[in-house]
Amino acid sequence: MKKTALYSWHEQAGAKIIDFGGYLMPVQYAGIIAEHKAVRSAAGLFDVSHMGNFYVRGHLAKDFLQYMTTNDLDKAKDGQAQYNLMLYPSGGIVDDLIIYRIDSETFFLIVNASNATKDFEWLQQHIGAFDGVVLEDHTDRLSLIALQGPLAMDILATVFPSIDLNALGSFSFCKTLFQGVEVIIARTGYTGEKGVEICLPNEAAIPLWEAIIEAGKDVGIQPVGLGARDTLRLEMGYSLYGHEIDQDTNPLEARLKWVVKMNKGHFIGKEACQQVESNLQRGVAGFSLDGRILPRQHFKVFNSDHQEIGRVCSGTLSPTLQEPVGTCTIVREYSKLGTPILVEVRGALHAGVIRALPFLTTTSLG
């Protein structure tokens, strides 16, 4: 089992540790609900150093990534990040990832922990056609810290007073120094709140983590584990690999058509996406259940005539809304908002309804 550079801090803080993506990671500290609410009301600090980190370099680096991914990197300028997807020729999803454009010949990729080895091999398998392009795995050298919440930027300004954080737009990033070490601060995140993700060398991870905790201690900052990270992303309807998206799901079936740019040049999986686009049969939808019954992944979904029409992708009791919510992959004709559904939980059918995603609006987030 691998450990992140912050593992000793988590252990000393009394975190509950689990195996996730081959790493020993904190699932909770004070508790999932308390940590979730801290992010929605103040700020939360996440160790996401288990994510894979690759550099792609070379004069054909952008051409290579344009071929390997679905979004259009021509739209990204230096200092900008872009949400993206890699597909198999079948249109199934290899992984979702964020690509940082450092400059025209240097790109930094953040991929899912459980897919990092597979992703690296997939990229390496296709790189030979792009002369001079080099792929580097920096996962074991770098840490990734996420600071999320309505007070996140105020807290960060205390730690980095020389940076104009207000000038850092969504999905933009900048480089700066922390105790003489270069860090990348990106306006990205996975909670729906304001915040950043900070990439830095392992040796600086604990000093920065402790500096942020100190800066936020008077306004309610909390360390947050993977448990609340999942409930936060689900309230916002964000996809998680292995749940809403996987190797058998086309992005057009998963509410990700906006990431697939059909009008750019050829990319792996483009033909499959075109075929699905002309005959879309299913999609991912949000839903809620009556009562307090919790929906879980793979539970069957039925229509009012008790015909099976889909499966649950993710489900939880929303700490913000205080009701059971989830996502499901469902036959398209039943994905209209307000459509009644039934979800099978432990052999019994429970009533629910198709809901809009995200479950939270800007107003409900405050």
Image (cartoon, helix red, strand yellow):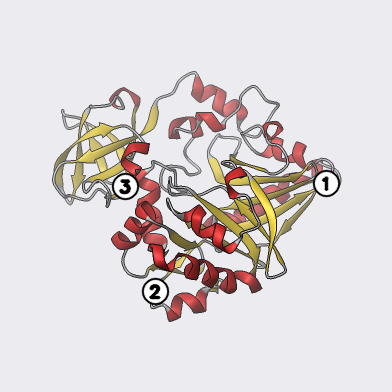
Q: Gap between marks 2 and 3, in whole Å?
A: 29 Å
Residue placed most toward the observer, 199 or 57: 199
> Relative to residue 283, is residue 2 depicted above or below?
below
Q: What secondary structure is marked by label 3?
A: loop
Q: In this view, does 43 lie above or below 351?
A: below
Q: Is residue 14 above or below residue 157?
A: below
Disc 3 crowd, CA 10 A, few/some/many (<14, 14-19, 20+)? some
Secondary-structure class at tag 1 = loop
What residue sits 39% from the left and 74% below the top? 15
Please identify the quadrant where the C terminus is shown. Answer: top left
> What residue is shown with label 3?
298
Q: Which of marks 2 and 1 is nearer the N terminus?
A: 2
Which disc is residue 58 wearing?
1
Nearest to the observer: residue 199 or residue 324: 199
Where does the image place residue 124, in percent across and percent down from the top left? 72, 51
Q: Name the residue under label 2.
A: 15
